[in-house]
Amino acid sequence: MLTEEILNIEKIRADFPILSRKVNGHPLIYFDNAATSQTPKQVVDAIVNYYEFHNSNVHRGVHQISQEATDMIENARDIIKEHFNAKKREEIIFTKGTTEGINLIANGFSAILQKGDEIIISALEHHSNIVPWQILCEKTGAKLKVIPITQEGKLDMAAFEKLFSNKTKLVFVAHVSNALGTINPVKEIIAKAHQHGAAVLLDGAQATPHMKVDLQQLDADFYVASAHKMYGPTGIGMLYGKEEWLNKLPPYQAGGEMIDQVTLEKSTYAPLPHKFEAGTPNICGAIAFGEAINYINNIGLDNIAAYEEELLKYATEKLQEIEGLKIYGTSANKAAVISFNIESLHPYDIGSIIDKLGIAVRTGHHCTQPIMDYYQIPGTVRASFAFYNTKKEIDNFVKAVKRAKTMLL
Amino acid sequence: MGIEEIQDEIVDEFSMFDDWMQRYEYLIDLGKSLPLIKEEDKTEERLIKGCQSQVWVHAEMKEDKLIFTADSDAIITKGIIALLIRVFSNQTPQDIAQSSIRFIDEIGLKEHLSPTRANGLVSMIKQLKHYAIAFQAKMN
């Protein structure tokens, strides 16, 4: 079994200076990794190095440092392409993050969908995964269908199959649920959708920090992710699209970089990936994103997954010792996320008290009101773990939750 | 007791605590003693909606004084409202409308609340003063 010693978690933690700070007089215990993960020194160094020595605009300069910056951002694209096993580097588009990737696809499909066409999404989705499709449906007259969830917080796959018709054009699900941690059976979903001739977009925001994602093996048509959940900076993410699909979709934004020829009458667009990267990109962010992926791969995603699984199991067992505590999302196939409530206590009260003990968790509906409505609760306390967390932190967290319970009851 | 004196009293009480866990314990106790709004009065119009917790506030005149009742689904929020009600309830609409609330800054409450809760606190104070202004207008 993997242990903290084998992975040398103490050494890994030293890469994250924020983990040694104090909050409210207590050592920080950071269990809000599903909201944003912390950034290792190596990634911060890449950011500093870029601004100190290579800062310039990309793709059009004739001078040396512009060429260096161009090489660096394109190298980051290659790192991402390799990491996710895309077929071609042109299939990787830099975005601001997952939300922009989703909006880019929704905007593209507004040119493709006809009235009466259907889109399938799941009831597990984050608000940012629901609203763009509602707007798209309003715009195009397409219909939104929703995969229901089960008590365990899993997708109801039998119901899913019944949602298809010959009008189904697109299926959109989160690879991993942000609120409950459920890992969805995406390979099966993609296979089913393809049988019906529908494309599939996966939201990989919560999956990519925890597991190896092989896009060719999955056969996903589109995949989106955010760097800041993968130990990289905020404001940068990636959209993967199969080349044939990206060629079909119209550009999302107009501006520099995305054009080929411009006359006052008509412009032609640049080839992929630049067709979707209007304006000066987040050069530094993209470079740091690549560095974050290198960092993860140095530890090894399989090691990360195994260790986080251990943390999840340990925390689940320890939390269940607390009388009246109920965990939401009990699928056997889960990422390192635990959503819970204690009896009638409000999640916000628990979160506020343990914050004073230095513990960062998320409370509330996690931007997934439909899930909370399903369980008829106002929200949950969500603890989400990363490879730099430890069992000792979990022990202190459980102690703090117990203390909060005693205070509040 | 007037609004000023009650604020002094609260600042005194909070100065006795060493840390924020003790202050939270006190807020939780206060929350349990909050004069509760009647269930049937928990209507949409009496709801101050926040991202994290919900608050209902009701005001009625008894003789020349305003009496507030309230509730929330979160207990710490209830404690904070209990403090506000202690300051504002049983005062004349005029006094409430003209008052300036300083105890929150003086006990350091605002900086120790999460931003959503701090915003909620600001809107609660506004709401209570709105009631006072509305009743004042009615009386004139």
Image (spheres, coloured by chain):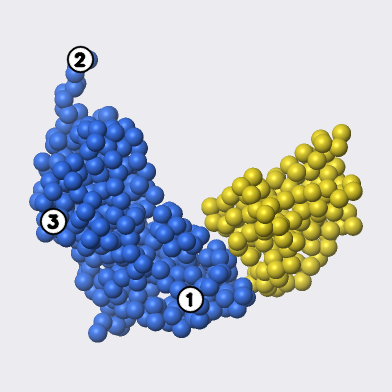
- Left or right of B45 in this view: A306: left
Residue A63 is at least partly visible in this image: no
Dot 1 and dot 2 within a common chain: yes
Which residue occupies 10% across, 41% down?
A: A244
Labels 1 and 2 touching (C-beta < 8 A) = no
For marks 1 and 2, the one nearer the N-term is: 2
For marks 3 and 1, the one nearer the N-term is: 3
Name the disc covering residue A191, or none: 3
Name the disc covering residue A265, or none: 2
Out of B125 and A12, give the one closest to the viewer. Answer: B125
Residue bearing mark 1: A325
Q: Amino acid at mark 1?
A: Leu
Which residue occupies 70% across, 45% down?
A: B126
Closest to the camera, between mark 1 and mark 2, is 1
Chain of the residue on which disc 3 is drawn: A
Q: Position of residue A225 (x, y in %)?
A: 28, 53
Chain of the residue on which disc 2 is drawn: A
Mark 2 burial class by Cα count in 10 Å: few <14, some 14-19, many 20+: few
- In the rendered picture, chain B carries what hue? yellow
Q: Amino acid at mark 3?
A: Ala
Tag 2 secondary structure = loop
Residue B85 is at least partly visible in this image: yes
- In the rendered picture, chain A carries what hue? blue
